[in-house]
Structures are given as C-alpha cells and as structure tokens.
Amino acid sequence: MTREHAERFAADWIRHWSHREVQQIVSHFAPDARFTSPVAAKRTGHPLVTGREALRDYWSVVHTFTTFQFFLERTIWDDAKQELVIVYTREIDGKRDRACEILRFDSTGLVYEGEAMYGASLE
C-alpha cells in the first residue's frame, strides 16, 4: 500500500462507518484478524475481538444508535510497517469525542491487526 492508497482507505473507512456499512468495513479484514478496543472490553468483558465474523457481530451495534457520524481529521502512514493511523472525531447519540484507529496490513492488503483508542469527550 502507498501513502496515497492509505489516505483513500482512511476516507472510505470514515464514510463506511458514517453510513454504518459494517459489511464493507469487515471486508478489509483478514479472516483471522485481531482487533483490540476499550469499548469491546466494556461490552464483552474482553478487549480483543478475533476473526472477521466476530468483528461483524461486534460492530453491528452501530445500528442501535440514533445518530452516528465520523469526521476524518488526518492520517498517519508508516510505509515500512504498513501501518495506518486514522485520527477522527466521532459523534454518537449527541456525544462527541476524538478517536484513532491503528490498522496493520498484511502483504495482501488486508488488515490483520487493529486497535482503537478513544479520547475524552469534547462536550
């Protein structure tokens, strides 16, 4: 992946989340991908979600929110590590905060590992 491709990926990532297109989001993940999130820890009791199917099930909760919108702030791309950081603001049911996703890509261009981090509320 090149920096230009990484920037397009980030823009698509934000658009897919904002439209709650869970299937599109998980299609970028390897079948055995691992994703770590503090929200997963709260929701499931464990911070790690493993596998594309488990990610689809976990992320399907987006359909329960009344409002859900992501806004891209910037991307950080590390070509040597094939690692993308997507920094964004999210607004969910009237609450606003900053967040970032760290995504690591395998040689086929699929995400094999990811991590989400969330900041303090912007309210």
Image (cartoon, rainbow, N blue to C red):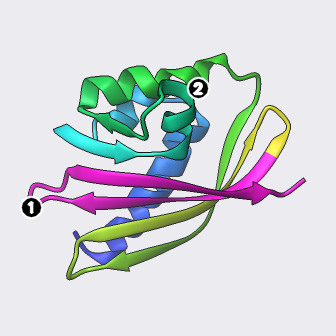
Q: Is residue 18 above or below residue 83?
A: above
Query: Where does the N terminus fall, quadrant-wise?
Result: bottom left
Crowding at mark 2 (Cα within 10 Å: few <14, some 14-19, many 20+): some
Relative to 35, 108 lies left or right: left
Instruction: Report which quarter residue 65 is drawn in.
Output: top right
Evaluate whether residue 29 shows in this view: no
Residue at 76% from the left image edge and 29% from the top image edge: 67
Taking depth in this image into account, of 34 and 13 the one nearest to the observer is 34
The residue pinned by badge 1 equals 107
Q: Is residue 114 magenta?
A: yes
9 sits left or right of 80 in the view: right
Q: Percent position (x, y) of residue 119?
A: 68, 59
- Per the image, the residue denoted by label 2 is 62
Residue bounds of the magenta highlight: 96-123
Label 1: element kind: loop
Badge 1: residue crowd in 10 Å (few <14, some 14–19, many ≥20): few
Residue under the image location 58 percent in, 26 percent down: 62
Label 2 close to label 1 by CB (< 8 Å): no
Identity, as a three-letter code, of the amino acid under mark 2: Val
